Image (cartoon, coloured by chain):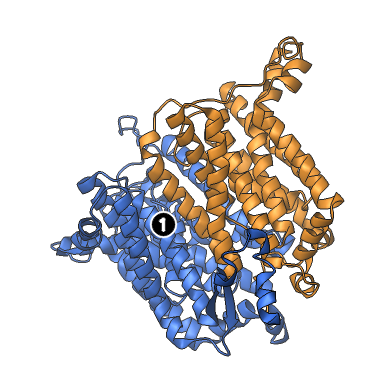
Chain colours: A orange, B blue
Amino acid sequence: MDITINILLTIATAATPLLIAAIGELVVERSGVLNLGVEGMMIMGAVGGFGAGYLTGSPWIGLLAAIIVGALFSLLFAVMTLSLATNQVATGLSLTLLGLGLSGMIGTSFVGQPGVRLPNLDIPGISSIPVVGKLVFGQDPVFYISIALTAAVMWFLFKTRTGLTLRSIGDSHTSAHALGIKVIRYRYLAVIFGGACAGLAGGHLSLVYTPQWVENMSAGRGWIALALVVFASWRPWRVLAGAYIFGAVWIGQLHAQAFGIPVPSQFLSSLPYLATIVVLVLISRNKRLTMMNTPASLGQPFVPDR
Amino acid sequence: MRIELVKRPQRSALFSMLSPFIAFALTIIAGAIMFALLGVNPLNAFEIYFVEPISQVWQLHELAIKAAPLILIAVGLSVCYKANIWNIGAEGQFIFGAIFGSIIPVLFPQFEGPLVIPLMLLLGMFGGAFYASIPALLKTRFSTNEILTSLMLVYVAQLFLDWLVRGPWRDPQGHGFPQTIQFGDSAVLPELMPDAGRANWGFVFALVAAVAIWLMMSRMLKGFEVRVLGSSPRAGRFAGFGFNKMVFFAFLLSGALAGLAGISEVSGAIGQLQPVISPGYGFTAIIVAFLGRLNPLGIVAAGLVLALTYLGGEAVQSALGISDKVARVFQGMLLFFVLGCDTLIHYRIRLIGMALTKSKGAAQLEAAPKLGEAR
């Protein structure tokens, strides 16, 4: 019983950063922008969060710093693609490359330093209830943020006027522009929101998941988050499901390694990446479904004419 | 302040030529700020970074060694990107080229003679092309996004290589080090001028590939096909060019070149397989391709510049104690500025000030330009 609960808890911890980063990217893509820089923003959030937490001693300040660093870093992408109309694929890639380099340089002095960890929720009397207590009331704060964030994005996109406007921009920026909607401003805000989410996801990695700084510690999670958005066909609740499936794969292979299953550890480690490919193939096989759900102006630059 | 883009009637030839240079100048300025923030005199740092690593002949050879894989990979990628096909998994294709090419020296070390090297190179190209055919197949057959699949395969390739050199291919006499046996003499790519430095035939392959791809893109029908399908797939279909065939062509070509780069690196510069055989050449080559304006000849120049950023990174690390990650930062900034400067080719940039409204509240910032027009 205890083992099952522990496995469920670790799955939730592994799924949380994927969920947060993917939910952020989902909003960005719904506005018609493809930001391939998730991995870069995430690792910048991780190093920023670790650094701020390490220097101030407060994991909460670290978490806040992670969000701010992610948002600021995404602003770079926003200026390039939205104001200068650069190629979104290439710019996103360069954001990732720059983020990986910059975080490595900033983090040189953090390697091997003890980090600070966000404490788990602990409500006296309730968190110690068997089974439910730990799972529902005893996880790290970011877990609750991730669930609330998913619900909030779901509500925002499908139940509010502004959300409808955002989706309309993603489907046809020219029509939206003709209606007098400020396409570029909406997209700026969406990209910055996505950056803040990726930063928060990175902060979770370096302040909760493994409270220390390791170079390239995001290990492709930003890319998996991007794949999750496609897998979820741009629906928030499917992102939630996908993130937990991938969290389970990630944890499953770690447990398999620990149990000494007679398969080389490298093969087990490559499972999350192979699973991503398999899932993408399964989803994109159904062309009609993909065509129907993809924001129609995804990845296309937009220059308003006056 | 707001940035507004005004479309040029036609693309600017001037900025098309100048943009890499402006980007480089901007990178230098940003780099100077970065060094100053790190508490290093920027002029001193730049001398160590950009001048000292190429002030002697043997160092030029080191430059050629670093530039060769970058150029080889980047010319292949340039064909992909021209066709609007996004292969970003060259790092994995590089690794698979190295693994396939190493089959002969690792598993059949007794096989010697002048045939060994050509066979290794062919196997390397095959390995890279084979690995690149996976995302191509998935894209054409299931229309799976090639960006994500090719990238995921990089992680898989790195883990596979790690398993090989720690497991079945490990040198039994290697004192437990994770590496294969040293390649025999006839499996080592010869050096061009052994007396002067270490540069090997890999650099020649890179130059030949660049010229060949340049000829193909500018003088042959295939190059025209790539450009048409890249800029307008619809027009390409009317012309009878098949998109799926193009996906395979671009992936196999870039994969084969990345594989060639991989086996050349392992057989020339390293001499055996190790868990890590590339300092991110496959990703840096993306920057090389864009800095070279997706033109094979421009890529040769860009490859030398990016090779210098690697050498400079090592130099500042040993001389100033700054992390060699500084090279990655330089490379990332360079790509950013190139992409930004490319905007100037198609657009004029107008800065629209909001001086008029400065004294008023922030809430009115929006309405103010309209008021101005009304007057």
For mark 1, name the chain: B
- Say what amino acid the circle numbered 1 marks: Tyr
Q: Is residue A137 above or below residue B103?
A: above
Q: Estimate the x, y position of residue B93 in percent, counting from the top left.
A: 50, 56
Question: Which quadrant would residue B275 be assigned to in this image?
Answer: top left
Above/below status of A240 relative to B197: above
Is residue A128 among what the camera can see? yes
**Disc 1 target residue:** B281
- Identity of the residue furthest to the bottom in this view: B9
Residue B75 at x, y percent in the picture: 45, 71
Q: Position of residue A143 (x, y in %)?
A: 68, 31
**SS type, badge 1:** helix
Look at the picture and state if B153 lies above or below B309.
Answer: above
Across and down, in percent, residue B279 comes to 38, 51
Nearer-the-camera pick, B321 or A277: B321
Choose between A246 and A273: the one closer to the eye.
A246
Near mark 1 (Cα within 10 A), the count class, few <14, some 14-19 or many ≥20, is many
